[in-house]
Image: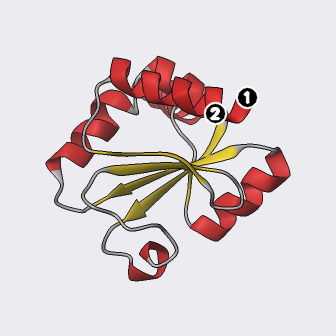
């Protein structure tokens, strides 16, 4: 019985959740190939608001569904190589929505609840549709 529950949990975890890309170059290449935009989530190892954003907002089922339309990348602020490729970060968490050519569509700083974050995603979708 325990094996069965473990298998179900494993499969459920692979069906749901966000597929994070590891680096900006890969994200931009995938975005071009899949005709998507990129969402970059910049966090810091000890940032409690980053953890809350991931645990509460980015893990919300409706947010996850919306983010399937983006290539998503998680960057640690301590990763100098990746940070040099991004616009200036004023604080964490920071989220950049960008085109495959790195043109910024929207950037936000700080923790956002599900409703507010969904509003930002809607703004990005409107900009893309124009």
Give coordinates of residue 108: x percent, y percent.
37, 44
The label shown at residue 127 is 2
* Disc 2 secondary structure class: helix
The label shown at residue 111 is none
Q: Residue at x 57, y 36 (%)?
A: 14
Residue with the most extreme front position? 130
Q: Quadrant of the C terminus?
A: top right
Q: Residue at x 34, y 64 (%)?
A: 89
From the image, tell me which residue sits under label 1: 129
Give coordinates of residue 81: x percent, y percent.
46, 82
Q: Residue at x 23, y 38 (%)?
A: 52
| Mark 2, other Cα within 10 Å: few <14 / some 14–19 / many ≥20 | few
| Mark 1, other Cα within 10 Å: few <14 / some 14–19 / many ≥20 | few
User: Which residue is at the front of the view, 100 or 6?
Assistant: 100
Q: Residue at x 29, y 35 (%)?
A: 55
* Disc 1 secondary structure class: helix
Q: Is residue 83 left or right of residue 64?
A: left
Q: Is residue 15 visible?
A: no
Residue with the most extreme right position? 33
Q: Is residue 11 left or right of residue 57?
A: right
Cβ–Cβ below 8 Å for labels 2 and 1?
yes
Give coordinates of residue 109: x percent, y percent.
30, 47
Q: Quadrant of the N terminus?
A: top left
Give coordinates of residue 40: x percent, y percent.
49, 53
The image quarter in which residue 54 lies = top left
Against 128, residue 30 (above or below) is below
| Color encoding of the figure | secondary structure
Q: Is residue 49 left or right of residue 84?
A: left
User: Which residue is at the front of the view, 103 or 83?
Assistant: 103
Against 30, residue 109 (above or below) is above
Q: Is residue 37 visible?
A: yes
């Amino acid at each position: 019985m325990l094996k069965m529950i473990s298998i179900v949990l494993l499969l459920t975890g692979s069906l749901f959740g966000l597929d994070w890309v590891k680096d900006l170059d890969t994200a931009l290449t995938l975005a071009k190939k899949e005709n998507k935009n990129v969402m970059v989530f910049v966090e810091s190892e000890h940032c409690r608001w980053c953890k809350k954003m991931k645990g509460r907002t980015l893990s919300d089922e409706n947010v996850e569904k919306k983010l399937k339309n983006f290539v998503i990348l998680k960057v640690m602020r301590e990763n100098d190589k990746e940070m040099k490729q991004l616009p200036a970060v004023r604080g964490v968490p920071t989220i950049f929505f960008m085109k495959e050519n790195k043109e910024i569509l929207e950037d936000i700083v700080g923790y956002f609840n599900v409703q507010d974050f969904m509003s930002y995603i809607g703004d990005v979708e409107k900009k893309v549709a124009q």
